[in-house]
């Protein structure tokens, strides 16, 4: 049974999704995961088409969208910027208009948030943000699903992001935690603190949900966290500042002593991947017993399938 408010919607930032809508998607994703383990072919995307536009590289996001859609009878079409005119010889608006006439939905991964917003405005079909410089909303859904697989209800739990607090992944976690009542800490050097404008938007959401938001440069603030989360020190497109970032973020590496500083033996480790082992996280942590990074990668597929089923109106009832 679908939640009718999700039909026809794009997923651009998660900011316009209510707590009820996010909870629906997470619960559906858990159901889909159980269903996938039980086996049995389904054809819920039969007759549907999905354009997958990639300006940046991807393993998980592309494969999650392609397999989730294709295995249920949908037809995904991969389009790199070497293949299509996207703002090169044709405006993004015009590309969007044309794709909207041919596809049931569009996924975009790339640089500017404005590109994915324009695609949604002009294509008139659901558009999914598969990562921009500003947000990575499908990642945040998989992250919270993974947190809940370890701890049950996520409300009132504490997730701590350690590293580049301004990046797309940290920003989307801030949004989803503020909506769902999950305490969220960003531990980062002051120059990499999250954008105050986004904190201003999330503050009232957190007050409403009961989430406590903390931004701190002090590594001691990992204490009490149920999960430590990190991401690469330099995101795609930031290759030129890699060295500088390494200098700033080396003291924020997630390693065994830092996991121990949570004071919780049951604390888990999360990472969106890809990871650079020996930089933002040590191999013994990401490959060790407290890591849930591989479940988290798998959960990308279940959460993305949930988003597509709900927004394309492909659920029974
Ligand atoms: N986590 C994530 O988005 O991975 P990819 O860059 O491989 O898609
Ligand atoms: N912050 C990273 C996430 C990769 C999934 C990047 O943008 O490169």
Image (spheres, grey):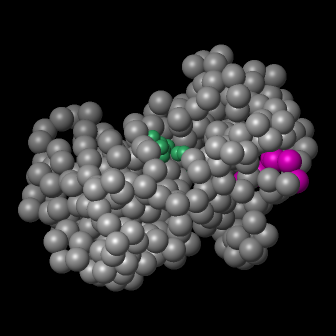
Number of marks present in the image shown:
0
The percent position of residue 166, horizontal first and vertical second, equals: 72, 56
Left or right, residue 114 beside residue 169 = left
The percent position of residue 207, horizontal first and vertical second, equals: 74, 72
Residue 189 within the segment the image draws in magenta: yes
**Pick the front one: 286 or 155:** 286
Q: Quadrant of the C terminus?
A: bottom left
Tell me the quarter of the picture where residue 315 sits.
bottom left
Q: Is residue 274 above or below residue 61?
A: above
Residue 233 within the segment the image draws in magenta: no
Left or right, residue 269 beside residue 295 = right
Part of the protein shown in magenta: 184-190
Task: For residue 269, say whether it is visible.
Answer: yes
* Residue at the image point whose x is 74% and y is 52% from the top: 165
The percent position of residue 56, horizontal first and vertical second, equals: 46, 50
Q: Is residue 227 above or below residue 50?
A: above
The percent position of residue 26, horizontal first and vertical second, equals: 43, 55
Task: For residue 259, say whether it is visible.
Answer: no
* Residue at the image point whose x is 70% and y is 70% from the top: 198
* Residue at the image point whose x is 18% and y is 35% from the top: 39
**Pick the front one: 135 or 199:** 135
Q: Quadrant of the N terminus?
A: bottom left
Tell me the quarter of the picture where residue 214 sits.
bottom right
* Residue at the image point whose x is 64% and y is 19% from the top: 283
Left or right, residue 267 beside residue 78 = right
């Amino acid at each position: 049974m679908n939640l009718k408010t999700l039909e026809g919607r794009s997923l651009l930032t998660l900011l316009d999704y209510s707590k009820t809508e996010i909870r629906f998607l997470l619960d559906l994703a858990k159901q889909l995961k159980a269903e996938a383990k039980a086996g049995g072919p389904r054809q819920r995307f039969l007759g549907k088409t999905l354009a997958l536009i990639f300006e940046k590289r991807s393993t998980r996001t592309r494969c999650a969208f392609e397999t989730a859609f294709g295995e249920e009878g949908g037809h995904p079409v991969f389009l790199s910027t070497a293949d299509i005119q996207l703002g090169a010889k044709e405006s993004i608006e015009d590309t969007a208009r044309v794709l909207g006439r041919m596809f049931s939905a569009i996924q975009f991964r790339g640089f500017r948030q404005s590109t994915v917003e324009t695609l949604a405005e002009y294509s008139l079909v659901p558009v999914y943000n598969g990562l921009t410089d500003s947000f990575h909303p499908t990642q945040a859904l998989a992250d919270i699903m993974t947190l809940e697989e370890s701890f049950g209800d996520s409300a009132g739990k504490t997730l701590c992001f350690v590293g580049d607090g301004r990046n797309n992944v940290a920003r989307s976690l801030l949004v989803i935690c503020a909506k769902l009542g999950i305490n969220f800490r960003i531990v980062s050097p002051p120059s990499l603190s999250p954008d105050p404008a986004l904190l201003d938007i999330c503050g009232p959401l957190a007050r409403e949900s009961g989430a406590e938001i903390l931004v701190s440069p002090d590594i001691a603030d990992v204490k009490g966290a149920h999960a430590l989360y990190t991401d690469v020190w330099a995101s795609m497109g930031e290759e030129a500042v890699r060295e500088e970032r390494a200098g700033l973020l080396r003291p924020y590496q997630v390693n065994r002593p830092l996991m121990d500083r949570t004071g919780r033996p049951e604390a888990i480790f999360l990472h969106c991947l890809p990871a650079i082992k020996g930089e933002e996280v040590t191999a013994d942590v990401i490959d060790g017993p407290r890591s849930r990074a591989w479940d988290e990668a798998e959960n990308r597929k279940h959460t993305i399938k949930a988003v597509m089923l709900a927004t394309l109106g492909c659920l029974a009832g």
